[in-house]
Image: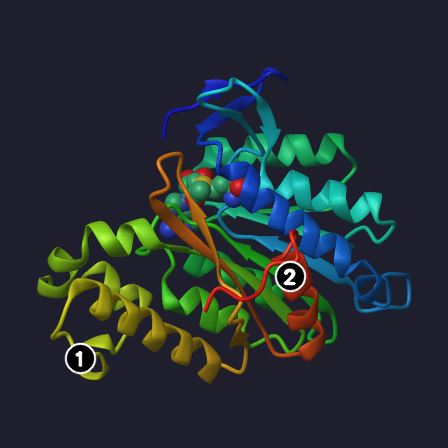
Amino acid sequence: MRWIKGDDGLPAEEVGVWAKKKHNYLGRYLDISRAARKKYIGPTKAGAAYFDLFCGSGRSKIRRTNEWIDGSAVVAWKTSVAGEAPFSAVYVSDIEEESLNACVVRLKKLGAPVFPIQANAVDAAQQMVSSVSEYGLYFAFLDPYNLESLDFRVVSTLAALERIDLLIHVSAMDLQRNLLANLRAEGSTLDKFAPGWRDNVNTTGSQSEIRRRIVEYWREKVAGLGVWPSINQRLISGEKNQPLYWLLLAARHDLAHQFWSTAANPEGQGRLF
Ligand SMILES: C[S@@+](CC[C@H](N)C(=O)[O-])C[C@H]1O[C@@H](n2cnc3c(N)ncnc32)[C@H](O)[C@@H]1O
């Protein structure tokens, strides 16, 4: 990881302009869902916590425009405060100590009740789930760089909580670029992302067809955990219109899906598929 010095002096990252889009969806969802969150906040309540398992440093510079933007955990905290339904706990984790520390300092400056965990996302998910009440309300943002880090155990561990909504970044670019290598390699990215795919996904036909089947298989596995992946997948594209990643919500409850269909359609657009 290469850090740069942030506009507040702490380590920061450089990102593509598309990072703004994902933060916009994240913020919209957390804003729209504020009334539901409010019901869980207060001294006698079980709490409403935010989990960011790939939190980064909390501040980034957009490569092309030099604009400084907040990272996901900072966006989430600020949005929850602005909506007068601040998270009762903000769990942040990252594999990189320097990123995590910078993120924690930034959140603490804003008064967030932060719980840092330096670990890979598989271990962090376990620690988060075992630290919280089973009666609380939870929102997890899973924003890895690639499919390999989106280990299925992260999703399955978090899905054990009854009231959890997950906003997941699925790397379309990774799936596209590395498909042939992944199909061949034992213990590949795909084995982590969608274990069991070899016995369940038909790998004949065009690459785009195989990719579609892999994502479909993953969606079925996620649904099998009881957290249904939304059909409203938002495709985030790069500056040359190349597909980068999908953002989608997985949740047990209808209300969460209703919130996402509004959050994912700022222009009132219909479904993608
Ligand atoms: C796309 S960046 C996160 C950006 C952040 N969510 C935001 O929007 O501001 C991905 C982060 O995942 C971290 N990371 C990579 N592999 C990981 C793993 N296996 N477990 C936990 N963190 C990981 C990286 O250090 C990096 O900070």
Q: Residue at x 69, y 75 (%)?
A: 134
Q: How many residues crowd mark 2 within 10 Å: few (<14), some (14–19), many (20+)?
A: many
- Rounded to the nearest angstrom, the CA distance separating label 1 from label 2 is 34 Å
Which quarter of the picture shows residue 102? top right
On screen, residue 171 versus residue 235, left or right, reads left
Measuring from the top left, give residue 10's x and y in whole percent: 57, 20
Q: Mark 2 and mark 1 in contact (Cβ < 8 Å)?
A: no
Tell whether circle 2 marks a residue whose Cβ is less than 8 angstroms from ligand 1: no
Visible in this render: residue 120?
Answer: no
Which residue is located at x 48 percent, y 38 percent?
Answer: 18
Residue ranking furthest to the right: 43
Mark 1 falls on what kind of element?
A: loop
How many neighbours does mark 1 have within 10 angstroms: few (below 14), some (14-19), or many (20 or more)? few
- The N terminus lies in quadrant: top left
Position above or below: 174 against 111: below
- The mark that comes first in sequence, 1 or 2, is 2
Q: Is residue 62 toward the left or the right of residue 34 in the image?
A: left
Question: Residue 91: where, in percent of width, then height?
Answer: 63, 51
Q: Quadrant of residue 170?
A: bottom left
Q: Give the residue at mark 2.
A: 139
SS class, disc 2? strand
Image x and y of residue 232, in percent: 53, 66
Q: Residue at x 51, y 38 (%)?
A: 19
Residue 202's disc is: 1
**Three-letter residue code for mark 2:** Phe
Amino acid beneath label 1: Asn
